[in-house]
Amino acid sequence: MLPGYHRDRIISLLRGVILLVLVLPSSNAKAQVNFRAVRGYLVVVPAYVNGLGPFDFLVDTGTNTTLIDPGLAQQMGGKPVGSQLLRTLTGSETVLRYSLGSLTVGLHSVFGLSALAQDMKTVQGVDPRIRGVLGLDFLLEFGFLLDYGHQQIELYDLGSAPDFAKGTRLPIQVVSGRILVSATSDSSVSGSWSLAVDSGIPKMAIFEDRIRELLASPRDESDKIRVTTNLSSLSTRVVSVRHLALANLQLRDVEVVVLPPSPGIQRGIEDGLLPASFFRWILVNARRGYAILDLDHKGRFQNLGTGRSRMPVKRTQ
């Protein structure tokens, strides 16, 4: 929520000092921010836009651009600098584009970032306090750690992101605003899948034309699922992939949402989506081309979701 207006000039001055401290560069390499978990897998952090806030922003590693709701765009007093086509798995629309003076999370800021103003009805149906979506155009300015076990996100200066000794290390590629990892499976038509790491979904998802369903166990009608994006929704099904390997992690009977083919979204980039919440924590260092992750052995990934899955915005152009 926006801070209330204060008649006391001393209080107002102190509030200004606090905001100034928030946007100054950190003397440490990292900045640790507590996040609010929604539905067990969505990550919501406090963010400051042009020095105003804090506002609740959803962290979405499956979205390549930052989004704000139109009301926040008006509240900032900014004027659109153009328009852009926004594509999702279930549709597309043209939205207004704004240039943000600054976007700040913890002690780290990005200046001059573009943001698309889009209706947040679906996201705010999950949590009405959310005013924006923090995309990879912000996150990839840093190294970042999503720690679901402690409900914290850490941002690191790119030159000083850590290289943990513990956890499983995977090579990653960043292609067209996607963080891609490779997974092998007999259920893949090619023997392996290129998966986009996505913090906005509760279950793994694979495009229908990339999965050999004869090698995946069919589920009954009760396992129908509705996929919802910011624009619309569709009904699909869930299958169980018998075997999946991420580096040395061997996974069995993984629930997978089957997505209809979407040439406008895939474009040969990814075969599917891998939930970040599958892991207890995941560290991404795009500059050095690796991710380090720790599998959550408590099965939180298998149990997330009860028939509805919010899929993130997948691409803009």
Image (cartoon, rainbow, N blue to C red):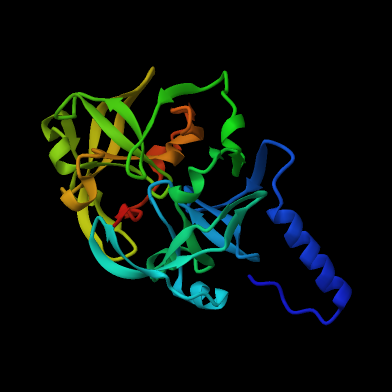
Q: Nearer the viewer, residue 100 or 123?
A: 100
Q: Position of residue 271 (x, y in %)?
A: 23, 38
Q: Looking at the picture, does residue 199 appear above or below residue 280? A: below
Residue 32 placement, left or right of 177: right
Q: Looking at the picture, does residue 91 appear above or below residue 275? A: below
Q: Position of residue 54 (x, y in %)?
A: 64, 63
Residue 140 placement, left or right of 16: left
Q: Looking at the picture, does residue 85 appear above or below residue 220? A: below
Q: Looking at the picture, does residue 283 appear above or below residue 117? A: above
Q: Nearer the viewer, residue 51 or 301?
A: 51
Q: Is residue 204 visible?
A: yes
Work out which quarter of the rendered image holds the N terminus and state it: bottom right
Q: Position of residue 61 (x, y in %)?
A: 43, 46
Work out which quarter of the rendered image holds the C terminus and state it: bottom left
Q: Is residue 262 visible?
A: no
Q: Position of residue 56 (x, y in %)?
A: 56, 62
Residue at 25 percent of width and 64 percent of height: 92
